[in-house]
Amino acid sequence: MVATFESVRKDIASKTLKPVYLLKGEESYYLEALSEEFENSILDEAEKDFNLSVFYGKDAQIDDIITSAKQYPMMASHRVVILKEAQTMDKRELAKIKYHINTDAIKENLIPQEIDAYHRSLIYAEEADVLNVALFGMTAKEWREANPELKGNMRDYATINQLICLSNMENINAVFINEGIAQSERLQKLNQIAIQQMTVLENVENKKILTK
């Protein structure tokens, strides 16, 4: 989904951030302004030492960028990785970065967000997309357009917990359809169910990791 300059600034100010932002456009002023806000407004000075990495395209090593992006925050709520001057990099190298970022972002941003107004307003021809939006926040077409270099579909990159949740949602949606509940209402109900179930499943998974 395309975001505006002001909507990204609001994300930064509220710290309700998406996993990845791709900044592009003809007006360099806006790109630089947002880059500075990402660098200076999310973390305080003490947090930056361990949680902020800034790379410059022609001098950056791909493995360093990917490794940095995969690290968890240390004593902070976020980890910020900024790649500047990406247009100076080889396209094949950029494709590697995008592949890792998109697949990891799908896996790590696991708790669904509440559906935005745009997706609530749509009528979906396929019930599969009702489930996709409720759980992943996007339709199959939107995912393909955002990830043209990836094979398969977003469900191929889902975690075990997401697939468990999706299976449960399919059964619940079938009940909703039999009860004659309108699609728009089903979408919102399924989204709330997805949030609740993924929260429970991830909490259980985290407890397993902690006790190993």
Image (cartoon, helix red, strand yellow):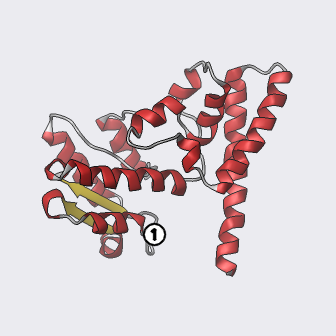
- In depth, the one of 140 and 37 nearer the eye is 140
From the viewer's perspective, tell me whether residue 86 is left or right of residue 186: left
**Residue 43 spot, x, y in % from top left:** 35, 64
Residue extending furthest toward the bottom: 212
Residue that appears at 54% across and 42% down:
154
Residue that appears at 67% across and 47% down:
195
Say if residue 113 shows up in the picture.
no
Q: Is residue 73 above or below residue 8?
A: below
> Crowding at label 1, few (<14), some or many (≥20) Cα neighbours within 10 Å?
few
**Residue 91 spot, x, y in % from top left:** 22, 48
From the viewer's perspective, tell me whether residue 62 is left or right of residue 74: left
**Residue 29 spot, x, y in % from top left:** 14, 41
Residue 126 placement: quadrant: top right
Q: Is residue 59 above or below residue 18?
A: below
| Amino acid type at image mark 1 | Tyr
Residue of label 1: 72
Say if residue 78 shows up in the picture.
yes
- In depth, the one of 16 and 55 nearer the eye is 55
Residue that appears at 70% across and 43% down:
166
Residue 131 placement: quadrant: top right
**Residue 96 spot, x, y in % from top left:** 32, 54
